[in-house]
Image: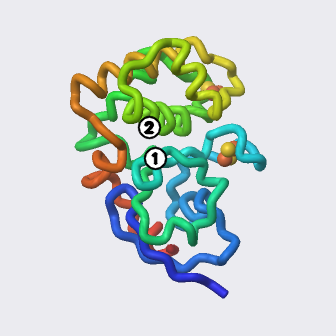
Amino acid sequence: MAISISLKVNGAPISASVEPGTLLVQFLRDQLRLTGTHVGCDTAQCGACTVHLDGRAIKSCNILAAQADGTQVTTIEGLAKDGALHPMQAAFKHCHGLQCGFCTPGMVMSAISLVTRQPDLTDDDVRAQLDGNLCRCTGYHNIVKAVLEGAEGMKSSGAGSATASAATGTTPSATAQATA
Ligand code: FES
Ligand code: FES
């Protein structure tokens, strides 16, 4: 039997009906059409599905949509503000911290959560703390550079958690809400 849930996604209130076994990542991608959150494995190892749940990075393939009832979820689509990239997104672009880009949304979401918890980071900290995000293109050198530059950008811009910045963030499309 379907379950009714209400939550905020990228600052927008959403009410939807989900099957009990629907994963949060399936809900985001298939019902809300927020396809920037990727699925790269079925073992909760790759981190491509990382989003923020109440300000903390979580793997959205590892929880049910029903468990997100009453929470605030931020996806990669909710980071840019008034057409300007979040400092961490800008750093990934500037440092070319990506190759194919498949892992990038999850990397960015994990990196923002990391910097929010630990603003002062070393190269080794980034490598250790982001070990739950895998890049199949193995371009880790530039990813680490991007996270360090993004951390500086977040400090100088005062960007805190993505949940806060998403308060005025992307609203899922009318189509998405209609299918929710
Ligand atoms: S798809 Fe969630 S960890 Fe790989
Ligand atoms: S850039 Fe291709 S998987 Fe990371």
> Residue drawn 35% across and 49% down?
163
Residue bearing mark 2: 113
Contact, mark 1 vs mark 2 (Cβ under 8 Å): yes
Q: How is the image coloured?
A: rainbow
The foreground one among 11 and 64 is 64
Instruction: Report the residue at 40% width, 71% height from top.
Output: 14
* Residue type highlighted by circle 1: Arg
Asked if ligand 1 lies within 8 A of label 1, the reply is no
Which numbered marker is on residue 56? Answer: 1
Residue 174 lies in quadrant: bottom left
Spot occupied by residue 91 in the image (x, y as percentages of width and height): 39, 22
Position of residue 169 measured from the top left corner of the image (x, y, whole percent) = 30, 51
Q: Residue at x 42, y 52 (%)?
A: 74
Q: Nearer the viewer, residue 142 or 161?
A: 161
Quadrant showing the N terminus: bottom right
Q: Under tag 2, what secondary structure? A: helix
Tell me the kind of residue under disc 2: Ser
Ligand 1 placement by image quarter: top right
